[in-house]
Image (spheres, rainbow, N blue to C red):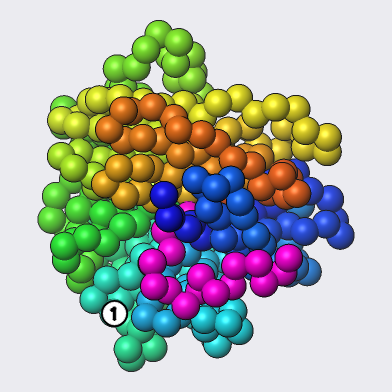
Amino acid sequence: MDITLLASTIARSTKQGESHGGLFLIRPFESKYCKILDWTEENIKWGGSGGERGLRGICFYKDYLLVATNNFIIVFDEDLNEVRRICGPLLNLCHEICVGEDQLFISSTGYDLIVSYDLEQNKFSRCAKFYGSPTRSERYEIEDTKSFIRQNEFHINSVYYMDKKVYAATGTKGDVFILSSGLDFINSFQSDASLRLDRLQLPDSHRGFFGRKVIAHNVYPFMEGFLLNYTENHSIVYFKDGRADWLVQHPSCPPHHGVTPDLMSHGWARGLCFTDRFAFSGSFPASVLTVDLNEKAPVGKMFLSDYMGHSVHGLEIVPPHSKFLKLWNVND
């Protein structure tokens, strides 16, 4: 199977002076990978979570690669030269990013926002802010956001563009919001039709995880429902009609010298992409699980064996004729 993935990683169990994030090309069906970029920002945050700790969401746009960090977006050319940085006061704790209609959509988790940036005019255009109980969203023009303060209440960490719609999700509840490409509210899945993870009907062996705060990542429309990383359960879940239709859990990670579990649970599922047949889910220590969507079963899991202190954050399928494929083995 000729599929190449691009993965971004962040620091989870590394020491100062060691690599703390980067970009990797991965061929999951060949169990091969190569590192194409090392991230060595001096202001890395070494404790806890959040903050500057590596590279996050990724997406392709024309001949460019866009990569999110904590509070800015890097634009790379096909040779991985940094072309420019997209910076703005509303970007904080950025997670996933995506592109549609020449707009870059950014999940600015630290502000509970989805922010859009016009890639043709090179300026921020508008945002959707999430608030209240039950959770609601409201569109704002950028000039009307000067009073916004940091407020990571809902952990808005997922954004996905498809068919002129933007799908955003709360990480703490798993509520899904459907917005227009202009970020106007269209619909949401909450209440009785909820995708809320605390109402999942899962096998008894998985129910113990509900004693903790539940966190989801990468909630994407798929077939007649949604495919997502149920992060604290280390699983990929497919939802249909507001229920968990099936679940595939990441296998346990073998012990590895130098990886300490105190910074992040092993198997912390984050980073997701898929074809019609296969899904690929990232986790910690740095690894990618391949799932057969027809069989609803794992195919295999490969580890980035030289970078086990990293955790996969962003994961994308490289387009088959992309010029970024020429970077394979560039550092070998």
Relative to residue 216, is residue 321 depicted above or below? Answer: below
Question: Residue 294: image x %, image y %?
Answer: 27, 33
According to the image, label 1 marks what residue? Answer: 102
Query: Could you say where residue 117 lies in the image, as x and y percent from the top left?
Result: 36, 78
Instruction: Look at 60% across and 60% down and name the residue there.
Output: 24
**Count of numbered circles on the image:** 1
Residue 235 showing in the rendered view: no
Residue farthest left in this picture: 186
Residue at 71% from the left image edge and 38% from the top image edge: 263
Q: Which residues are magenta?
A: 313-332
Kindly tell me whether residue 307 is visible in this rendering.
yes
Quadrant hosting residue 112: bottom left
Q: Position of residue 197 (x, y in %)?
A: 35, 29
Q: Nearer the viewer, residue 145 or 52?
A: 52
Assign the C terminus to one quadrant of the image. Answer: bottom right
Q: Position of residue 48 (x, y in %)?
A: 69, 44
Near-viewer residue (35 or 44): 35
